[in-house]
Image (cartoon, rainbow, N blue to C red):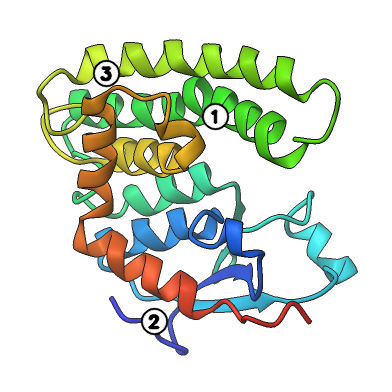
Amino acid sequence: MPMNPDAAIEVTAFGWVPDFARGQVRDLRVRWALEEAGLSYRTRLLTGERPAEYYREQPWGQVPFYREGALQLFECGAIALHIAERSEALLPRDEVGRGRAIAWLFAALNSMDVPVMGHVVATAFHADEPWSPGASRAFGEFLRGRLARLGDWLGDSEWLEDRFTVGDLMMVATLRSDLALEHAPDNVVAYVRRGEARPAFRRALDAHLADLSPDPA
């Protein structure tokens, strides 16, 4: 769905991020969910210092933040689940399929995001620290083990279950960084590329990038 300045749904995102973060900020996950669900939205962009009142919306000053009438949500997983509840494109209506999709969403944010972010923080954000090589190696081994298990689960399957769900959306989004995929087996890399090839993802990524100014000011 195209962005609509009159849409009822508002997503708060950053108006600028460094080059390495473009395409990785977590508002992209919410935009992708909205695109899969066919829901239009508008954006509010944060630039410069966070206004003090924003911390009453998002306690850590992060993005995304979601507003729809009286409903206000933070945390991309909670927002994606809320969107999925409104669309069978993301969340099956049968009890078993719904439960499995939600389980994979939580797996992405817990079992996979922890080693991914640990590895990224140690390897990229603190590369000059004396403890970085040891921490990077430890998180890399942890991540490699998790990715191997995920690859065993996937096998030759297209998605984590019998169809694409919000669980796949969150898992693909979690694993998209080069630092994560360098540790992944081939079938996991192919799985992430399938997710990135979805038209809804491409529309979400284009909208995310279009909102980012080249000027850090």
Toward which corner of the image does residue 13 lie, by quadrant? bottom right
At numbered mark 3, what does the secondary structure look like: helix, strand or loop?
helix
Residue drawn 66% across and 66% down? 17
As drawn, the residue found furthest toward the right would be 52
At label 1, the amino acid type is Val
**Side of 94 relative to 201 (left or right):** left
Q: Which residue is mark 2?
A: 3
Query: Would you say the residues marked 3 and 2 are in contact, meaning their CB atoms lie under 8 Å apart?
Result: no
Q: Residues within 10 Å of mark 2 (few under 14, many from 20)?
A: some
Q: Are marks 3 and 1 in contact (CB under 8 Å)?
A: no
Crowd rating for badge 1 (residues with CA inside 10 Å; few <14, some 14–19, many 20+): many
Residue 99 position within the rendered picture, expressed as x and y whole percent measured from the top left? 29, 25
- As displayed, is residue 35 above or below residue 42? above
Which comes before the other along the chain, label 2 or label 1?
Answer: 2
Residue 3 lies in quadrant: bottom left
In the picture, the disc for residue 116 is: 1
Task: Give the left or right position of residue 33, taking residue 197 as reference.
Answer: right
In the rendered image, residue 114, in percent from the top left (x then y), is placed at 59, 25
Q: Which residue is mark 3?
A: 151
Q: Crowdedness of circle 3 by 10 Å Cα count: few (<14), some, many (20+)?
A: many
